Structure formats: structure tokens, C-alpha cells
Amino acid sequence: MLGANGGREIDVESFQESPPDPSELVTHLRVSVSGGASAYQKLGRVEQDRAIAGVAVWLELEGETCRQARVAVGGLEPRAARLPEIESALEGARPADEEARRRIAELMTRRVRAQTDELATADYRRHVLGSLFERTVASAISRHAGTR
């Protein structure tokens, strides 16, 4: 971040919780990669449109068991959000198992907040989120298998 008082670094969680001052500019992002695999999928009217719902997933697997997970959703509200409760549900689970994935997706759809706007209703966003999450997790698992 660069502003009138100089530069500073902040982590993504702090950026999400407390946006920068309007006079500050994001000058660069530093992303550390520590293995695992990620995937992102969104639902929009057309590819270039903003998301009605979007899911980003990062998984670190040991065999079929998830050791670490990061999950974020976008398009549901004005700001994207991480979902620590869903991350915890994935950790220790076997996300390649369709039933386990479905249960976690159901938990997600019950827990997230969503808005109604000109693109979609809150109920529709929650409805599509579950299957979007399941497909995104399956994609991350597939990518993880391809990295071995």
C-alpha cells in the first residue's frame, strides 16, 4: 500500500476486514505458494460479467484427506469473504468423497449471507452456491492429482 504517509504491507485478512484509506493505492500483491492446488469457478450471465456467485478453493491433501483448506466466496455480497467454518469442515475430511462434499456444500449454503440485486435474488445465489462449491472442490482435487 502506498499513501501520503509512505508505504506499508498488510495481510489479506486485514485488507478484507478494514479496507485501506481511499487515499492509499495497492501497488503490488505478494502471494506465497506452499503446495496444494486451487480452483475458482463463478456463475455469471456471461463470462465477462461480475459473478452472481463465485467460489475459490485451495486444498492441501495428504492422500485423500484434506490437511489445510482455504475457501472464499464472491458475488454474494458487495465484498468477497473467506469462510473459516467451511475451511474447518474440509480439514480432516475426504473431499473427494461426493457425500462429504455435498454435506459441506449444504453447510455453506446455510451459513452464507447473500444479497438480492439486479443480477439475482439472495435465495438463487445460495441455491447455486452449493453445486458451484462442489464443482470447484472437485476441480482443485483434480489439479492436486495432476501435480504429483
Image (spheres, grey):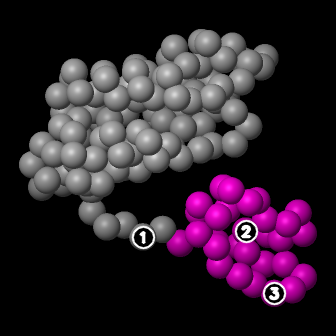
Q: Earlier in the sequence, mark 2 or mark 3?
A: 3
Answer yes or no: do the residues labelled 3 and 1 have beta carbons within 8 Å? no
In the depicted structure, whether residue 146 falls above or below residue 133: below
Q: Earlier in the sequence, mark 3 or mark 1?
A: 3
Answer yes or no: do the residues labelled 2 and 1 have beta carbons within 8 Å? no
Name the residue carrying label 3.
6
Q: Main secondary structure of the magenta part?
A: loop
- Counting every numbered tag in the picture gives 3
Name the residue carrying label 1.
32
- Asked whether the viewer can see residue 53, the reply is yes
Q: Is residue 111 left or right of residue 71?
A: right
Answer yes or no: do the residues labelled 2 and 3 have beta carbons within 8 Å? no
- Under tag 3, what secondary structure? strand
Residue found 63% across the figure and 43% down from its top:
80
Question: Which quadrant of the rendered structure holds the C terminus?
Answer: bottom left
Place residue 94 in its image quadrant. top left
Question: Which quadrant of the rendered structure holds the N terminus?
Answer: bottom right
The amino acid pointed to by label 2 is Val
For this rendering, which residue is in front, 99 or 27? 99
> Over which residues does the magenta segment extend?
1-30
Tell me how far mark 2 sits from mark 1, CA to CA.
17 Å
Characterize the local packing of mark 1: few (<14), some (14-19) or many (20 or more) Cα atoms within 10 angstroms.
few
Question: Residue 6: x and y, percent?
Answer: 81, 87
Q: Earlier in the sequence, mark 2 or mark 1?
A: 2
Residue found 38% across the figure and 45% down from its top:
87
Q: Is residue 62 left or right of residue 51?
A: left
Question: Residue 69: x and y, percent?
Answer: 34, 50
The amino acid pointed to by label 1 is Ser
Residue 13 in magenta?
A: yes
- Asked whether the viewer can see residue 129, the reply is no
Name the residue carrying label 2.
26
